[in-house]
Amino acid sequence: MDNVLGDVITITLPERFHGEQAANIGWKLEESIGRNCQVVMDFSNVKYIDSSGLTVLLSVNKSVKSNEGKLILRDMNEEVRTFFAMTRLNQVFAIE
Amino acid sequence: MKAFPPYPVCFEYSQPEDREHVLLRVQQTLQDIIGKVDFSLEVALGEAEANAYRHGTKVAIKINRIGDRLVIRVSGNGAGFKGNDAVATIRAAGIKETFEASLSNEHGRGIPIMLSMMDRVLYNKRGNEVMLIKKFNQQKMREVD
């Protein structure tokens, strides 16, 4: 976890967000999610993401929403942004 | 110009701790062949490999080049599944429609992602090997020794 400030959690994702590494990040994050918490996931380093990464994001999103919080995905490169558009998950996530 | 071993270029692992290292070598090989990082190709291959890894203990990846087409076979020692039926079902429903219909699902995007990103996706009869084919600009692909 990069930063936990009040009820805002900011996390910088690794270059390759997939598989067990992504799952571990998700589990740790979900343990930290509190009521009305805002989670910001920084994608600026991410060059690779696949469906296993999406699974983690969807799970975190569900946890955040059930706690009446908000998940924001930030600073995606063009290819990753296109990947979210292709899978239509740009309709599900708040992408900045 | 970097020399290549003759096609197919083969990789395999049977120990989970070797997985990440093998995948990095595969990606490096693909980048060497096509002369750039190709996000779509890497993701499609990643989906195929993840499926094989999820259902087996041994995964093999073979990269071949036929003219301007890159042909990648990913196989695992798992039981296999009716992959071509799954592909046909998704194609019949529409790939975009399949994504739209599964927005809240946490799983089930692997095959539609492969179909979106590759020119052809074909399973073997047993369903434990998938063949991914993508066409590239031949001029930009490096020649084989």
Image: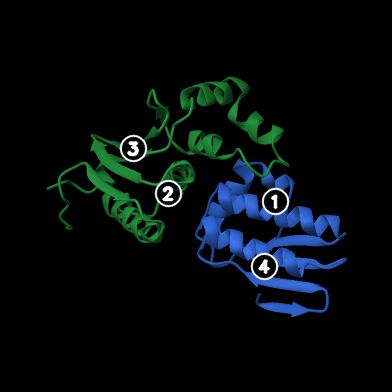
What's the distance in space between the residues labelled 1 and 4, CA to CA?
15 Å
Q: Which amino acid type is shown beneath numbered disc 3?
A: Arg
* Badge 1 or badge 4: first in the primary sequence: 4
Instruction: Decide if residue B104 is on the left or right side of residue B134.
Output: right
Say which residue label 3 marks: B73
Q: Is residue B74 above or below residue A81?
A: above
Quadrant where the N terminus of chain B lies?
bottom left
Residue A22 figure quarter:
bottom right
Residue wearing tag 1: A58
Identity of the residue drawn at 79% across and 59% down: A64
Q: Which residue position is annotated with label 4? A: A28
Tag 2: amino acid: Glu
What type is the residue that disc 4 sits on?
Lys
Do discs 2 and 3 share a chain?
A: yes
Across and down, in percent, residue B85 comes to: 51, 21
Distance between the Cα atoms at labels 2 and 1?
Answer: 22 Å
> Is the C-beta separation of discs 4 and 2 under 8 Å?
no
Q: Closer to the camera: disc 2 or disc 1?
A: 1
Q: Residue at x 44, y 31 (%)?
A: B80
> B59 or B46: nearer the eye?
B59
Give the CA distance from mark 4 to mark 2. Answer: 27 Å
